Amino acid sequence: MPLNRRKFIQQSALVAASLTAPQFLSRLSAADAPAAAPATSPATPVSNTTAAVAAPPAIVYPPAPTPIVAPAGFGVAPGPFQPTWESLAAYKSAPDWFRDAKLGIWAHWGPQCQPEMGDWYAQKMYQEGSADYKFHVQKYGHPSKFGFKDVINEWKAEKWDPEHLISLYKNAGAKYFTAMANHHDNFDMFNSKYQPWNSVAIGPKQDIVNGWKKAARDAGLRFGVTCHGDRAWSWYQAAQGADKKGPLAGVHYDGLMSKADGKGLWWDGLDPQDLYAQYHPVGDYDWPQNARHGAVPLDKAFTEKFFNRIIDLINQTDPDLVYFDDTILPLYPSTDVGLRIAAYFYNTNLARHGKLEAVLTGKGLDAEQQKCLVLDVERGVTDGIQAQPWQTDTCIGAWHYERSLFDQHKYKTAESVARMLLDIVSKNGCLQLNIPLPGNGLPDADELKFLAEFTTWMNTNSEGIYASRPWKVYGEGPSVSGTQQRGQFGGLRDVRSYTPQDIRFMQKGATLYAYALGWPDNGQLNITSLAEGAPNADSKIEGVELLGFSEPIKFTRAATGLALTLPAQKVGDYAYGFKISGNGLTV
């Protein structure tokens, strides 16, 4: 006979294990989680948007959460922009502040960082037999008793110091900072009027986004927010499931709980469906969450709630940049939510600042859409110079904090990020780089080491990066002429192998900067794009300087290239900037 979920929770002791994530994983076996599938059986695969756990029959679905009604006219602002592609095309191009900034640092930080198990914990913990599921059972208890809503309550951010962190990021060269406002876990990281599950009401009991905003603004940085919370309808479907084996087989996880189930518990008065959005049968949905094969279409109240949350976020934070983790726009093309947000953001930004200073990013944009939004390439770069400014978003590790990457020293190095940044900037792009934080908000030793090393490199080399523009060609060398590896989400890979023959170009005013992505062993560097009579450099070269070196660099120019004789000792690390002067050399 099925158990009453609320009584089951109240009668069950919730014992949190003392093991950390890496300690647990090192001892992981089938015996660690008796309710899990045997170690010889692979975990049931679950796609990005479709739960693979089939819910038992005769489910009584919880009621939809009671909507928080927005006032009349909410989310509509006077101005030139309307929620159509034709109107948004008047945007034309990103503002100069973004084109000049080149580097932003991102805190992709929220309650999924608390377990320190990496990306998508709030989904994977409901996948019976997975490493995250086994860790969760050992650390917190069974997902029918202790779900992700309870993990949120465990997250306290007790060592978070936004002023200190922003000072580290600014020293490392960031000109803008972005804070995650919500993830696919549907939890708002600010004092949200339209999402009761937020960081002021639960967990840290702090307005995380506005704390970041104050620190960033006080430091003179531009401020952005990232929004991923439109995904919950399909993303949380595994939370409807139940174990197929073990003593709790058939007992549903907490994704089907209702407000009534919380009576007498810590979340009394809150509706889990405001968080999980699982008041519908499990269905098949594509990435924009269009219903397939008879699945239940998204509830209009769900999509409008997301719209209200983002408008509220814009009103509270007046961001310079809004990033959406979506192809084109959130909930597009099945709804006009994204178009309406874009029009509101542009109109309110224009009214507040007297000129349009807004940046709104989307992924997978075609040429016409790039007149309306700024292209973002996740964990990748474009294959050439783009006519419009664009952005890479990537991370030195996992998006959410993963302790094992620190323990194994597997973060991206300052060397790889420096070279990546130069490649991006040479193609008219900016880099938004996530430095993942543990749940407590305190960076680990390897992250501090990365920031210190990158700070040193930027202090020497940033002169040719900030406020630069692409040159006639973005680069030369094997990384340009040879086979190039594709990225995970489109474009080219963000981290690739480079040689001293790989050069990246950018210009600022009358000065050309050429960055060699390595130091040649023989101390000789030849830049073929600057050869005598080369079509892109048909002017005289008057002088060459090496950034960080006090003496001029000796050079000769021939039909084979501009030959530079470098100092006997290597100057600096990773990549080396050469400042090249000559009348008519730049565009």
Image (cartoon, rainbow, N blue to C red):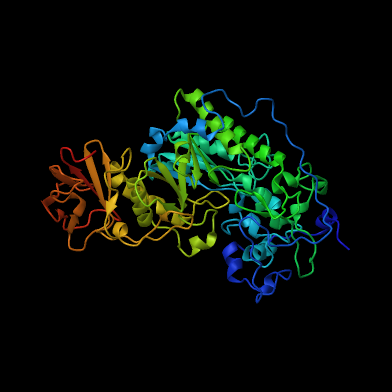
Could you tell me if residue 354 is visible in this image? yes
| Whole-percent x, y for residue 522 in the image | 17, 63
Q: Image point 56% across, 22% down: which residue?
A: 78
Farthest residue in the bottom direction?
A: 40
User: Quarter holding the N terminus?
Assistant: bottom right
Residue at (43% x, 45% y) in the render: 391
Residue 544 left/right relative to 6: left
Numbered label tally: 0
In depth, the one of 80 and 203 nearer the eye is 80
Q: Is residue 152 visible?
A: no
Q: Quadrant of residue 20?
A: bottom right
Residue 178: x and y in percent read 49, 41
Q: Is residue 227 left or right of residue 143?
A: left
Residue 116, percent across and down? 58, 57
Tell me what residue is drawn at x 62 percent, y 45 percent. 229
Residue 386 vertical placement versus 516 (above, below):
above
Residue 268 location, x and y as percent? Answer: 79, 44
